[in-house]
Amino acid sequence: MNAEGLLESQRIRREIRDGRITGTSRGLALGFVQCNLAIMPKAYAFDFMLYCQRNQRACPVLEVTDPGSPVPHKLAPNADLRTDCARYAVFVEGKQQADQTDIKDLWRDDFVSFLIGSGITFDGALERAGVPTDRHRWVLRTDRPTEPAGPFQGDLIVTMRWLTPQQAITAVQVSSRFPFNHGAPIHIGDPAAIGADLDNPLFGGPVPAMPDGLAAVFWACGVTPQAAAENAKLPIFIAHAPAHSFITDLPADEMMTA
Amino acid sequence: MNAEGLLESQRIRREIRDGRITGTSRGLALGFVQCNLAIMPKAYAFDFMLYCQRNQRACPVLEVTDPGSPVPHKLAPNADLRTDCARYAVFVEGKQQADQTDIKDLWRDDFVSFLIGSGITFDGALERAGVPTDRHRWVLRTDRPTEPAGPFQGDLIVTMRWLTPQQAITAVQVSSRFPFNHGAPIHIGDPAAIGADLDNPLFGGPVPAMPDGLAAVFWACGVTPQAAAENAKLPIFIAHAPAHSFITDLPADEMMTA
């Protein structure tokens, strides 16, 4: 807590809400869980929740708000989901609109918000175990279909990290302790075995050649449900903009089991 | 597999469907996951799923069927949920009706079925680790409220086991490896600390005095969501009858992580 009695997560969210922080959430409020956001009309919420249940490794739902409520009571009880992301991505009938810095003008009484776990949650635990997380990391499409539900469907999206063999073993151990946050890797080794698209990462340029002595390790990624929601071409769908996640008050280490 | 190429789970379900097995599912198809069933009209399914998400330890949803489909494609693709439990409990407006041995006459095109993990799934793993599971086990109400969703609410129901201190430690370790099936205990020690009602277990007579040298260990129980659905007084709600669970084709050990 700071001098005002605020958690660092609360302080950062206030800075975002007041427009003093406008950039990425990466590196902010370290140690607190950051979430992917998916906001949609209630009419689609059951099918989306079903999609997340059927693809649980990729889509760990940490909280679902009551229709019309912008407050995630469990993860950040004094937050407002309409204002507390620095940047929102907005899709109308599946077409991306201009990003917004708040969504007060778009908010509806039937909006349901899903807070979905992000792989960066266990970055701190990996670092403490000697696994670097600040490099050799990409978000990639694969050709492995997810299990559909209603209009929601699409291929699995993964996070790939390059690690030494010893780091890879440690990373399996550490991430297994976060079963509600993607958990253990879904694959180790040849990217082609899961059809990972190395030429077109979701962020940044093509993946370079992997140095000798490293192994590619793949985790199901929380971008998967967001992509499925874009594919569904809902009348309106709102997400956090990439790298501008919602910061919760939940310490990442509280997600750890076993 | 047997001589006909059937899994033991498939063979048992056929015996149940044909009316040759009419009793409890306890001890049948050992090693296969057994599920609690909750079947309700789609109009209530979103709130029920929300309830399960908000009380995940007690309500591990393993599969949700498409509306109108009696087939759990993931857990038992050749099963029929209308006939493959030996005994069903039926509630109309919250009032329990006579049990039925199938629900073909009640089935509706808008029924959604939830298959919910049961604590007996890790009994096999506990036994192999030296923790007996055939005695000193009760299902108890507590006074700890669950987090409500729509009409679904109620107090947490727990499974209490009496174990030696060494068994208790082992049981924490083993059950932690089943995070999607209640996971680690929620409490060890004084039943009064969680308001556990020792006088009125859900099945059987009052709990006797605990022998010296044992510890009471408590897990969130999959009866919790069923009780919440009864409390909601839906126009119609169908569950498996107690101890007559739905037997899936999923090996229990496949639920294990880490």
Image (cartoon, coloured by chain):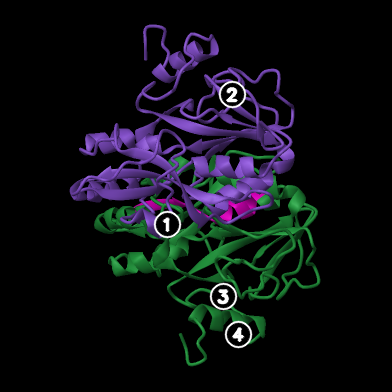
Chain colours: A green, B purple
Report in which chain the residue with disc 3 lies: A
Q: Residue at x 59, y 24 (%)?
A: B81
Q: Is residue A228 left or right of residue A132?
A: right
Q: Which residue is mark 1?
A: B194
Q: Nearer the viewer, mark 4 or mark 1?
A: 1
Q: Residue at x 56, y 65 (%)?
A: A74
SS under mark 2: loop
Q: Which residue is mark 2?
A: B81
Report in which chain the residue with disc 4 lies: A
Q: Is residue A255 above or below residue A150?
A: below
CA gap, disc 3 and disc 1 = 43 Å
Magenta stretch holds residue A116: no
Q: Nearer the viewer, mark 4 or mark 3?
A: 4
- Disc assigned to residue A24: 3
Report in which chain the residue with disc 2 lies: B
Q: Residues within 10 Å of mark 2 (few under 14, many from 20)?
A: many
The magenta region covers A215-228
